[in-house]
Image (tube, helix red, strand yellow):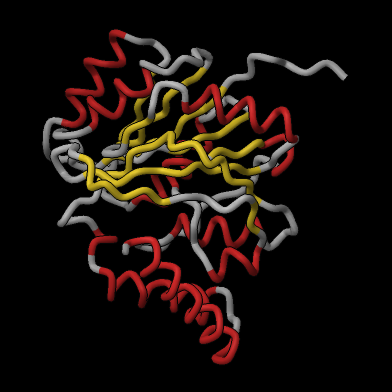
Amino acid sequence: MIINKNPLISIISPSYNSAPYIKLTINSIIAQSYRNWELIVVDDYSNDDTVEILKELSGIDTRIKYFLNKRNQGAAVSRNRGLEESNGRFIAFLDSDDLWYPTKLEVQLSFMIKNDCPISFTSYELIDEKGKSLNKIIPVVRSINYTGYLKNTIIGMSTSMIDTKLVGKKFRFVNIRTRQDTYLWITLLKTGIKAYGIPEILTKYRVRSNSISANKISAAKRVWHLYYKLEKLGILKSSYYFTFYIYNALKKRI
């Protein structure tokens, strides 16, 4: 079997009022040592200068493509539009305020091809709104399956990559307000595949005070909703996995 050593990676990035950060985010993609990528940004009806920045950068680099939602619909809809527009065998995700280290794609792609890996994710560090390090690293686990992920939602969205040759191309995000990324991993891992961690720190995750995920109590409630309402685990199993989720969530932030 002939293996393409230089496969296309489709990078999907939803944006909404991301003007303060998105240029830095895209520049971290342009700086990648691996060059065969396409960036698909789907803007969710921003009312700041995000679209103007996207027009400017796409005019400079033709690998950058952007699409505009006609109304605000949420990250799930935007990510699904990105999946529909993607052309690559490999799918990577990068939120519009996060950053990659220059070797992120190269290291991750090499790992996945070498190990025939369907899903991978990397360690990452936390930065504040101004890009200053918070001196906190979120390490990976070596591998994780469905039940392991229910206990420890360790996969950082901006660190992840999917091989559609192994996972398939039909996966989509459930249209919920938030935690649609968490539920994606639940649904994919439930099929029996595993996700594999790369210990190298390759991503910077920006912690913003006004982000949806910043309210930890609300975030926990939404995870419970995933377990109990969407995944229909029942009260006992939901409580069991949710206890582990709370423990690991606290552990990651201490």
Q: Which residue of the protein is positioned furthest toward the bottom in this rendering? A: 236
213 to 198, vertically: above or below: below
Looking at the picture, how far across and down is residue 203, in whole percent?
Answer: 39, 37
What quarter of the picture does the N terminus occupy?
A: top right
Residue at horizontal 22 percent and vertical 56 percent from the top: 211
Q: State the count of labels.
A: 0
In terms of depth relative to the viewer, which is nearer, 130 or 20? 130
40 to 182, vertically: above or below: above
In the image, taking residue 134 as reference, residue 205 lies left or right, namely right
Looking at the picture, how far across and down is residue 217, in whole percent?
Answer: 28, 75
Residue at horizontal 64 percent and vertical 45 percent from the top: 170
Residue at horizontal 33 percent and vertical 39 percent from the top: 204
Residue at horizontal 75 percent and vertical 35 percent from the top: 116
Q: Which residue of the protein is positioned furthest toward the right in this rendering? A: 1
Looking at the picture, how far across and down is residue 49, in whole percent?
Answer: 13, 30
In terms of depth relative to the viewer, which is nearer, 229 or 36? 36
Looking at the picture, how far across and down is residue 178, in whole percent?
Answer: 36, 61
In the image, taking residue 71 as reference, residue 202 lies left or right, namely right
253 to 33, vertically: above or below: below
In the image, taking residue 208 as reference, residue 233 lies left or right, namely right
Q: Which picture quadrant has residue 209?
A: bottom left
In terms of depth relative to the viewer, which is nearer, 80 or 127? 127
Q: Is residue 71 visible?
A: no
What quarter of the picture does the C terminus occupy?
A: bottom left
In the image, taking residue 94 as reference, residue 71 lies left or right, namely left
Q: Which residue of the protein is positioned furthest toward the top in this rendering? A: 60
Q: Is residue 76 visible?
A: yes
